[in-house]
């Protein structure tokens, strides 16, 4: 990474820290966790962005990756990662591989990552980029709404697109003590980032964290509009 890109990355981290401070009243997080920051610094976001968008890699904003999908805003990636409260070795299921960036952040945290993507072109592109960047992620090209039952249960589950409801299969595949982070809401209506926890007795608890804006969870490749 050249000096200019390093300066841009430092600027991005500073913006994320500031946004954590500004949203603390909603999220409960007054600062960015050191381990999450380390993961953000260790993963080059430009590797997971289409070549014609790479000049914007260090902007704190979502960017198009094709097929009507986006790479998430870095602050949101950091927040969702911090909400998972990952320990090294945790088994984490990601629904919506997309660009592969969130999966790379999870792997950089020491998680064992299982990632599902329904759009074949994105799944293959992410696989190549993750291998190139040196991250080991188990991937599956399928509908993620039903999770990955063969590998369940999981210590944490993260959904990177908005669902109209919390998929029951994902709650079922969560370990007692586990956490599910998911944006819930309609495409054009209000969406809320939700934290779902399952206690030691298996009881499920839901907490609204923050208003967000995500592309919808695709359950059929024909649902995508083919635009950026």
Image: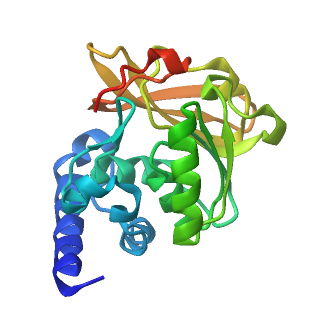
Q: Residue at x 23, y 80 (%)?
A: 6
Which quadrant is home to the N terminus? bottom left
Q: Nearer the viewer, residue 76 or 141?
A: 141
Q: Nearer the viewer, residue 19 or 97?
A: 97
Residue 111 relative to residue 46: left or right: right
Asked if one can make out residue 109 in the rendered structure from this viewpoint, the answer is no
Which quadrant is home to the C terminus? top left
The image quadrant of residue 43 is bottom left
Q: Name above or below for residue 35 compared with residue 197.
A: below
The image quadrant of residue 59 is bottom left
Q: Name above or below for residue 105 compared with residue 81.
A: below
Instruction: Give the x, y percent position of residue 151.
Output: 80, 42
Q: Residue at x 65, y 43 (%)?
A: 178
The image quadrant of residue 2 is bottom left
Instruction: Give the x, y percent position of residue 64.
Output: 29, 41
Instruction: Give the x, y percent position of residue 122.
Output: 50, 41
Q: Residue at x 50, y 22 (%)?
A: 218
Number of disc labels: 0
Residue 124 relative to residue 216: left or right: right
């Amino acid at each position: 990474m050249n000096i200019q890109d390093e300066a841009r990355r430092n600027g991005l981290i500073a913006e994320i820290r500031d946004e954590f401070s500004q949203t603390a009243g909603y999220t409960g997080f007054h600062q960015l966790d050191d381990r999450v920051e380390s993961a953000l610094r260790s993963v080059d976001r430009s590797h997971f962005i289409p070549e014609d968008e790479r000049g914007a890699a260090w902007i704190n904003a979502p960017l198009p990756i094709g097929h009507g999908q986006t790479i998430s805003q870095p602050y949101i990636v950091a927040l969702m990662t911090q909400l998972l409260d990952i320990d090294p070795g945790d088994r984490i299921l990601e629904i919506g591989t997309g660009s592969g960036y969130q999966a790379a952040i999870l792997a950089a945290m020491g998680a064992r990552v299982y990632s599902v993507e329904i759009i074949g072109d994105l799944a293959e592109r992410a696989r190549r980029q993750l291998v190139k960047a040196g991250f080991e992620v188990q991937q599956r090209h399928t509908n993620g709404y039903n999770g990955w039952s063969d590998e369940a249960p999981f210590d944490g589950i993260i959904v990177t697109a908005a669902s109209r409801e919390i998929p029951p299969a994902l709650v079922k595949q969560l370990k007692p003590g586990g956490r599910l982070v998911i944006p819930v809401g309609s495409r054009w209506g209000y969406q809320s980032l939700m934290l779902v926890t399952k206690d030691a007795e298996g009881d499920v608890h839901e907490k609204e964290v923050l208003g967000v804006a995500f592309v919808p969870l695709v359950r059929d490749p024909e649902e995508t509009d083919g635009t950026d």
